[in-house]
Amino acid sequence: MKMMGIIFSNIYDEHLGEITKERTLASLPFGGRYRLVDFVLSNMVNSGITNVGVITKSNYQSLMDHLGNGQEWDLDRKIDGLFILPPFGTGQKSVYKDKIEALWGAKRYLERSDEDYVVMSDSNIICSVDYSEILSYHIKNDADITIVTHKEQIENKTDVKGVVVKSDTSGRVIDVMVNFNQPGISLCGLGMYILKRERLIEILDEATSYNQIDFERDIIQGKYKQMKIMNYEHMGVALRIDSVQRYFEANMALLDKKTRDEIFYENGYVYTKIRDEVPTNYGSECKIKNSLIADGCTICGTVENCILFRGVTVSEGAKVKNSILMQDTIIGKNVKMEYIIADKEVKISDDRLLMGAPKHQMIISKGKIV
Amino acid sequence: MQKKKKCIAMLLAGGQGSRLGVLTKSIAKPAVHFGGKYRIIDFTLSNCVNSGIDTVGVLTQYKPMELNEYIGNGQPWGLDRNRGGVHILQPFTKIKSKEWYKGTANAIYQNMQFIDRYNPKHVLVLSGDHIYKMDYSKMLEEHENKNADCTIAVIDVPLSEASRFGIMNATDDGRIYEFEEKPKEPKSTKASMGVYIFRYDVLKKYLTQDNADENSDNDFGKNIIPKMLADGLNMLAYSFKGYWKDVGTIESLWEANMDLLSGDSALSLDDNESRVYARNYDCPPTYFYDGSKICASMITKGCEIYGTVENSVISSECIILDGAVVKNSILFPGTVVEKGAEVNYAILGENSKVGAGAHVGEPFGAEKKGKITVLGSGYVLDCGEVAKAGEMLGAR
């Protein structure tokens, strides 16, 4: 049975403030050399999917630049491959508000594809899943829609999850909450759905005629009694990025070997755009502890508990701790910094002292000179 | 009609590289790993692309599988073109003969049909076993300006080493009047770099003549160049300044890798105008554990480092475990150095493994440079065993 993929690149942009100001959430740098979209896209490719549409909304230049013709994901194909689907509007309706409207704009693409099933996914979850296994589960249970969930701890009332489900022993969804905030362990949706392509088109037609725009509220919550919606629980690691704090924690989670092995190796490699960087140079005075360092860096100072992206320079005498330094950041001599998220091309002048806090990282926006 | 190309490149990559021993047991020399993430041929291929040459014929013969797979459709170098691009040219059977490439000149002769398709004005002949960055377009410009039949790139070498090279004796304005292959008493220090530009009509004539001569070795250095000189053709020496190294021996391969660490090397890999391209490995960034100690080294992505690395070049996906110490060495991709093992002055082949507590190469502490120890690809040195300095161990 063949599947196609649909990726939503803009959902949840607004939750991350500064770092998604000039890019989509999907093109947010992550894990030293990746962008968030790489994980979902690589999962799809590693599950045998060769036809993927990426739905965009706004600020998607960086995403297009990153994806290019899809060559790095082996999606530069004559038949199928990668399709970037910009907002499709007629008349007054220019930009979509939610998933159903977005999919409505991509209806022609859905109709023209010939795969039997569609995997839809947001791009804010870092995990390693094999969609072909979920498809087998979906077919075995004769489901209308399968929703992928993961057990998560909701800590307090401000910690809101998009979709939370309850299921019976057979796995069938028997209750759906949207924007759920009751502390405790719940089955939280990972924003991934599998359903028949033709069924999806029917759902879109019907929803549009009732002016329904929200896939989670109007379809998953509104129709779980009429339709057979199955819950597929993902047992491995799933890192949800829905705030700056979570973004920081998810990056730091990669410093754990078990997490790293699962995300990067278990279900095939994670592919990303190639920068043709040289290997990283380490000076004679450098000290490195518990850090993930990409190619193309020059490290002469001290680096502890950090994620360093490609092309970062850490000069002599500098001490960088608990920080994320994105592509081409330059740290001057004798700089001391802790709990910093430095966006691309940031330059920190010599002898500066910069401190964020464990629960509140300081963000230095793209291209700034401190 | 296909537009005529001004210049295309023919890259000789069929050499066995027997002096590299176990490292070329199953691959051709140009496919040997270099500088952590490159292979030797990447330098020549990238030079072509960075010089605006978009048509490259790669002539392979010895153990070509891995090299052919590596080059693939040429995409990593931007050579996946509709008009031109990279082409692998292997020996093939003809109606009347079945033969391998007999010499460098014969290899080009057998592929004249390929060159004719592009009908270029000039042909650049290169060898795929040198490490250097060069803009061939400047050499081509001089070749055209001076209306030369053949231009040969030369580099100044120390007089003491000149007898290891093919030496070009030229007048002050660059005209070559004599060529000596490995002379005992060199008259000049201009060594041939194995980079030639020929006017194609001239080359075609000489290759055809050479092929008809049964006593010929069909070699550029031994036959074609001397014949052209004897006939009084307009032959120029083009002086190249910069880093150039023949990595044909274990010693020179080791040295060229170490040159990358010295910092003041003329070979800058990290410059945007003339980047060196390579086929990519899809692995995550390198991870350093709490106990790792790194000093003056170059480390590629995908490694897991628990131990000590000093003055070494580490390729992708290597694992160096607790208490292991790697000094003055080159690790090819996928190498594993287990707990407490020691490696000094060594080249460890692809996917080789040094068992816990084993020792490879010179003992630590000796100040001067030691002999290089080599483990072939896939070789496993068992726990506690010793590979002596200068030893070369092949796959079991």
Image (cartoon, coloured by chain):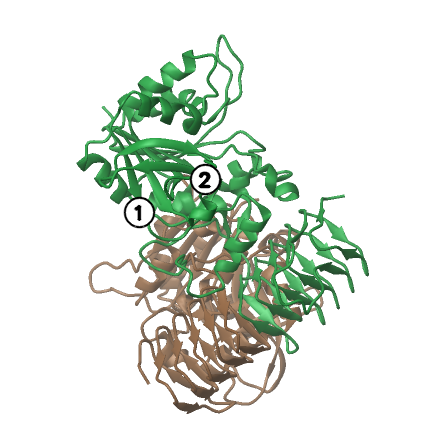
Chain colours: A brown, B green
Lower position in the chain sequence, tag 2 or tag 1: 1
The answer to whether residue A300 is above or below residue B343 is below
Q: Give the residue type at disc 1.
A: Asp
Report the residue that reaches farthest toward the left.
B145
From the viewer's perspective, tell me whether residue A84 is left or right of residue B355: left
Tell me the number on the disc at residue A175: none
Residue position marked by numbered label 1 in the rendering: B135
Residue at 72 percent of width and 44 percent of height:
B395
Residue A36 spot, x, y in % from top left: 46, 66
From the viewer's perspective, tell me whether residue A148 is left or right of residue A114: right
The residue nearer to you, when weighing A202 against A293, is A293
Secondary structure state at the residue bearing disc 2: loop
The residue nearer to you, when weighing A211 against A73, is A73
Q: Give the residue type at disc 2.
A: Phe
Q: Tally the numbered discs.
A: 2
The answer to whether residue B16 is above or below residue A278 is above
Label 1 resides on the chain identified as: B
Give the distance between the C-alpha atoms of the residues marked 2 and 1, in whole angstroms.
22 Å
Residue at 45 percent of width and 60 percent of height:
A278
Tell me the number on the disc at residue B165: 2
